[in-house]
Image (tube, grey):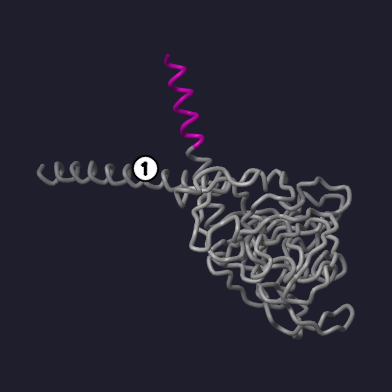
């Protein structure tokens, strides 16, 4: 008799545990889906986007919808998985879409401006600070599939709070 | 009232189920069909144009390798397309391909077609289909960035008579 009541108690405890875990799992899954399909927040730093973004670090909010729909154009700030190191994500500005003719200037490799045509399925990305940015001038146009998101909002620091881009 | 709450419960369950499925397939494992014969005989060994759909293999793809982007030579990987084929939808960057990695970043690699020896750039890899005759691979578009890789193929799960692990080397054996 005592054993039976104990068993019932254990069963209710187990049920409670399962319920709580399910809530946590659901929450994490919703978080993942929002983060991967709607919008994500990232912390970016470094000198390559200098006049636009700060050296010390900004918190940016990027949306995932327009890269998926292919609605990106020149001038958009994007998060790109670096073709040189796949573990890093870099923030750059799109300069040319597929088929565009891009004229660029690399202060580190002479004074002559060069021209390139962006191949199909690729984009040309460049940092705003052309003196220290490692971008398409260095590794060439990047495949569209590497674009992770379009930055549209800055959340930190407080004086830069607001929409980015135009 | 009764139908309303029933519908609401059903929708809730449905959405939860969908969200969990998407998360698991994004982060851990997923199952994808193999289209075309570019990886035969490893995958889709007998694909004929007449009943291609019926004999398609379904493969298990694991995503744990994406945490560090560590791969080894001979891995069969799924990656996002970078080329836009003619007569295809403009959504082509979402299309995925399955090929075998034959050279890793910063390796010297002798391409079989034109006997050039070339160095794979940092962060890139060279992919080839096992069926060299009908494969759209690095021989036509060059090395691809590792960032495009979406997972590693580990097992064939369908059809039942072909269930089994995918081997790390291609049947012909690449000499590298």
What is the quadrant of residue A148 in the picture? bottom right
What is the quadrant of residue B136 in the picture? bottom right
Name the quarter where the C terminus of chain B is drawn: bottom right
Q: Provide the major secondary structure of the magenta segment.
A: helix
Query: Residue B11: within the magenta?
Result: yes
Instruction: Tell which of B11 and B167 is nearer to you.
Output: B11
Q: How many marks?
A: 1
Instruction: Tell which of A86 and B92 is nearer to you.
Output: A86
Disc 1: which chain?
Answer: A
* Left or right of A55, for residue B174: right
Instruction: Tell which of B163 and B94 is nearer to you.
Output: B94
Q: Which residue is depicted at the point 23% across and 44% down? A: A13
- Disc 1, SS: helix
- Residue B4, position as x, y percentages in the image: 46, 18
Would residue A52 be seen by someone viewing this image from the given angle? yes
Note whether B98 is above or below B115 in the view shown. Answer: above
Query: Residue B4: within the magenta?
Result: yes
- Residue B113, position as x, y percentages in the image: 88, 78
* Left or right of A58, for residue A110: right
Q: Which residues are magenta?
A: B1-15
Q: Residues within 10 Å of mark 1 (few under 14, many from 20)?
A: few
The residue where tag 1 is placed is A23
């Amino acid at each position: 008799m005592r054993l039976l009541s104990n068993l019932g108690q254990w069963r209710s405890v187990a049920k409670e545990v399962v319920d709580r875990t399910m809530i946590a799992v659901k929450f994490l899954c919703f978080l993942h889906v929002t983060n991967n399909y709607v919008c994500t927040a990232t912390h970016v730093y470094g000198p390559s986007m200098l006049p636009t973004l700060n050296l010390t670090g900004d918190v940016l909010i990027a949306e995932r919808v327009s890269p998926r729909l292919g609605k990106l154009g020149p001038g958009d700030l994007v998060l790109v998985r670096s073709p040189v190191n796949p573990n890093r994500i870099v923030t750059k500005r799109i300069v040319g879409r597929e088929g565009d003719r891009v004229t660029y200037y690399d202060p580190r490799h002479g004074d002559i401006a060069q021209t390139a045509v962006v191949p199909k399925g690729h984009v040309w990305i460049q940092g705003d600070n052309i003196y220290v940015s490692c971008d398409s001038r260095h590794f060439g146009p990047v495949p569209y599939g590497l674009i992770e998101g379009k930055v549209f909002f800055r959340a930190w620091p407080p004086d830069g709070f607001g929409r980015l881009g135009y | 009232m009764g139908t309303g709450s029933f519908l609401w419960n059903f929708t809730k369950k449905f959405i939860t189920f969908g969200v969990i499925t998407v998360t698991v397939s994004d982060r851990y494992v997923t199952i994808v069909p193999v289209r075309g014969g570019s990886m035969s005989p490893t995958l889709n060994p007998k694909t004929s144009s007449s009943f291609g759909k019926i004999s398609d293999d379904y493969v298990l793809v694991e995503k744990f390798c994406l945490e560090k982007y560590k791969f080894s030579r001979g891995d069969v990987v799924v990656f996002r397309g970078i080329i836009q084929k003619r007569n295809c939808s403009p959504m082509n960057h979402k299309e995925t391909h399955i090929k075998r990695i034959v050279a890793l970043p910063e390796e010297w690699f002798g391409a079989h077609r034109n006997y050039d020896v070339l160095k794979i750039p940092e962060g890139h890899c060279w992919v080839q289909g096992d069926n060299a005759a009908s494969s759209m691979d690095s021989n036509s578009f060059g090395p691809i960035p590792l960032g495009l890789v979406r997972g590693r193929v580990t097992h064939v799960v369908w059809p039942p008579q072909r269930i089994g692990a995918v081997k790390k080397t291609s049947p012909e054996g690449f000499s590298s």
